[in-house]
Amino acid sequence: MIDISPACRDALEQWLERKRSLEGAAENTCLAYQTDLRDFLAFLTAHRGGPQAPVALGRITTPEMRAWMAHLRGTGASSRSLARKLSAVKSFCRWLAEREGFEPTAVLSARAPRFQRKLPRPLAEGDARNLLETVREQPAAAWIGARDSAVLTLLWGCGLRISEALSLRGADAPLPRTLRITGKGGKERVVPVLPAAREAVAAYVRLCPHPLTEDGALFRGARGGALSRRLVQKAMAEARTGLGLPASATPHALRHSFATHLLAAGGDLRAIQDLLGHASLSTTEAYTSVDTARLLEVYNDTHPRAGTTARSSSG
């Protein structure tokens, strides 16, 4: 593997530490950044014939950026992956430029390829209800069924990420009418808790055989340790298989369902953004596409003129 200069390696570690400590970036995110930037710096080393000092990044040219992206294309990188890598490189070079005093013009002006963003794949309301019921009934131990159902109810009823639901402590029970949740990037938001979610958690707490301490995890595994996301994913996989639902019916799909069902009921997009903890409204706007697609599907299936058009076309 082509190495990079010690100075660039140190700069990268400092940037990653800043991401962790000041911006609250998750460890998996930092590992992805580290891989992407090491690969970029290694490419630059090979392209220029030797390790580069940090200030040398200020002399990157537009043809070099194009050569790097062509190299990524040659390795089979998708447009989505290339856009993510370019975003990491721009962020690092912007920070480094401020520190070293240069203008990363060629890097910042590089344009990511266009790609079609994947739309969220929510569950229909009836499927979500059936999943929660199946998850509750499928384990042999009633308390485990109540636990899994409570976790998934928080995802669908409150729009929590699975990591956010599993981060709840014993002190959070019984659940209040609102929860203060710390999400990605350390961003806090206040989330209303529906009666159904409070009742689901209360039912689990009553049945849980393990003592729930104030500082300990609220949701426990069979042996009393903190519940892992893998077990929740496994429970939902078993339930969706039994119900004949697609592989897209994951725990995170329940968070998508929360947003889509709110929007369909007339929810305000800005309010939904706040409830989900999205940093950008453009992320939340993806749900408007889902809602529009669903409306068109209903229209095509039920509108008399649509039906007439379909029949005449088939004739």
Image: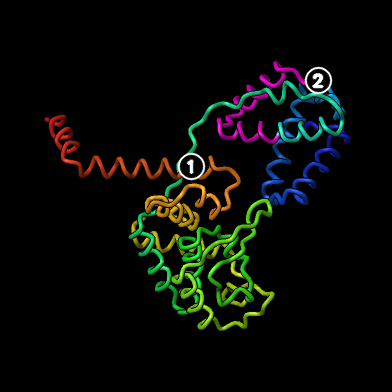
From mark 2 to mark 1, how far is it between C-alphas? 38 Å
Q: Relative to residue 265, is residue 227 depicted above or below?
A: below
Residue type for callout 1: Glu
- What stretch of residues is rendered in magenta? 59-88
Residue 211 place in picture, x, y as percent: 62, 83
Q: Relative to residue 29, is residue 37 depicted above or below?
A: above
Quadrant placement of the C terminus: top left
Q: Is residue 100 left or right of residue 63?
A: right
Disc 2 to disc 1: CB gap under 8 Å: no
Q: Is residue 25 magenta?
A: no
Mark 1 lies on a secondary structure that is: loop
Q: Relative to residue 183, is residue 32 depicted above or below?
A: above
In the rendered picture of this protein, how many numbered marks are placed on residues? 2
* Quarter residue 186 falls in: bottom right
Task: Please say whether residue 119 is visible from this viewpoint.
Answer: yes
Task: Please say whether residue 247 is visible from this viewpoint.
Answer: no
* Quarter residue 56 falls in: top right
Residue carrying label 2: 59
Q: Which residue is nearer to you in this view: 307 or 282?
A: 282
The 10 Å Cα crowd at callout 2, few under 14, some 14 to 19, many 20 or more, is some
Q: Is residue 71 left or right of residue 117?
A: right
Mark 2 lies on a secondary structure that is: helix
Residue 285: which disc? 1
